[in-house]
Image (cartoon, helix red, strand yellow):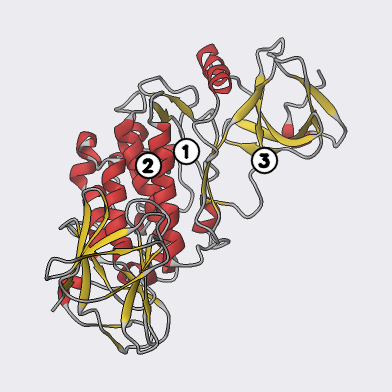
Amino acid sequence: MPDIRDGENMELELHCVRLQNGGEAAVTGKPERSGKGVIYPVKVSGRDMLLKWYTNPPEDDFYENISNIIRNGAPSSQFIWPEYLTEKESDGSWGFVIGLPPHGFYDLGSFLLGRAKLSSFSKMLSAAMNLCNCFKQMHGEEGFCFSNLNDGSVLINPESGEVLISGGDNIVPEGSPFGVMPEARYMAPEIVSGTAVAPNKYSDRFSLAVILFILFFASHPFEGAKAVSRPYLTPGDSKKLYGSEAVFIFDPANDSNRPVRGIHQNVIRSWPSFPKVLKGTFIQEFGQNMLKTPQGRMSVRSWEDKIRETRDGLILCPNCGREMFADTAYGPTNCPSCAKPVDISKVLVMQDRRTVPLVLGKKIYFEGNVPEAEVVKDQEGNLLIRNLSSEPWYVETRSGKTKVVKTQGFMPVIEGLRITFKTNDTAVISKNY
């Protein structure tokens, strides 16, 4: 095999790498460094793909893990998964081949640097739910965890909110030792500091919280004044900043790592726009107690509940049409864009635990990531709820009568009406203040 391992000096001529299945990957362009390896554009059977080549190959267990991952296949279509493993060279070096991300997706680094931006609060929340779903799929029957994460591990379409997990060499069975030492930025502090020797669901919960924070605020939760004071991080600096001395940028008990004006403008501008339920959750999950007590971190399903509660409060201002979060616990509110008052006097109380403001244009989600109801108006200006779901609703009036609302049908927004969306899934229209 031609020497393609010195990626910095590689000439642009075709090289071939032997694959375990007997095929070949033909190198077609310039390489780029990526963590502990080098990424090459390649063609396999006429298909454009990527080859990750390890210049200093990890232990044999890591090679076997990639082989098993390829054999078992991706958890779902939300994962860009290794598809081919190369044969080992005489010096022990090897690589694997993975598909290209589809057009329109950007990595986390692009969002942090302002090169990409989610198009709306609605898309942010969709992306957050999609990300949680990826983590649930990964933690499923196989019990995989992230052994490493970097800017390119999570890809997001800012127009649709779709999420893809890219990798495979960064995913191992829970409790397995690291094949490649992880980068610090997205990993749990106990891993960064070295007190934990293997990833698990608790370290993944921390990583999920970090990525969610980046989705909403386009900033890193631990990169504030402390990071600015160390523009060139040594390995020792990283162990402190993300590990033993990590401080959340909005830690209410420690202001030593606050965002710096002129540098961290994304989070400074956006933090006030989000509801207390979301901000409070990040303050809790990034507080010193959770940094030091991994077992107390919030589960993926609990994150989904918090994201649903946040999305329940997302409305369109009926005056200017801009997105805003309405806090139904505090009565009337004003739009932060046009400053005009917004009437949220009627709410939908779902299962006695979720409160959804009934404002024109409000889309209502039950459990999934697709709206199943929408608030509209009739010709007289009265508010109605349209059934966007695939099932009929059963509406009980105060007098005890039951009416059926078919798919694409409407019901009035009248206090006291009780709706059954599906078995044991009910809601009632209530007065908010």
Badge 1 or badge 2: first in the primary sequence = 1
Q: Nearer the viewer, mark 3 or mark 1?
A: 3
Look at label 2 and name its amino acid: Ser
Residue 331: x and y in percent read 17, 79
- Type of residue at label 3? Leu
Q: CA distance from mark 2 to mark 3?
A: 24 Å
- Amino acid type, label 1: Leu
The answer to which image quadrant residue 190 occupies is: top left
Q: Which residue is mark 2?
A: 207
Residue at (29%, 43%) from the top-left corner? Answer: 301
In the rendered structure, which disc, 3 or 1, sits on the residue that comes first in sequence?
3
Q: Which residue is the extreme one toward the right?
A: 13
User: What secondary structure is found at the residue carrying circle 3?
Assistant: loop
| Residue 235, image x, y percentages | 44, 37
Mark 2 Cα shell of 10 Å, populated few (<14), some (14-19), many (≥20): many
Question: Does the residue at mark 1 contact the one at mark 2 (Cβ under 8 Å)?
Answer: yes
Residue pointed to by mark 3: 100
Give coordinates of residue 327: x percent, y percent. 23, 72
Could you tell me which secondary element the residue under label 2 belongs to?
helix
Q: Residue furthest top?
A: 90
Q: Residue at x 25, y 83 (%)?
A: 343
In-front residue for pair 364/270:
364
Quarter containing the C terminus:
bottom left
The N terminus lies in quadrant:
top right
Which residue position is annotated with label 1? Answer: 149
Q: Residue at x 37, y 44 (%)?
A: 208
How many residues crowd mark 1 within 10 Å: few (<14), some (14–19), many (20+)?
some
Gap between marks 1 and 2 measured at Cα: 8 Å
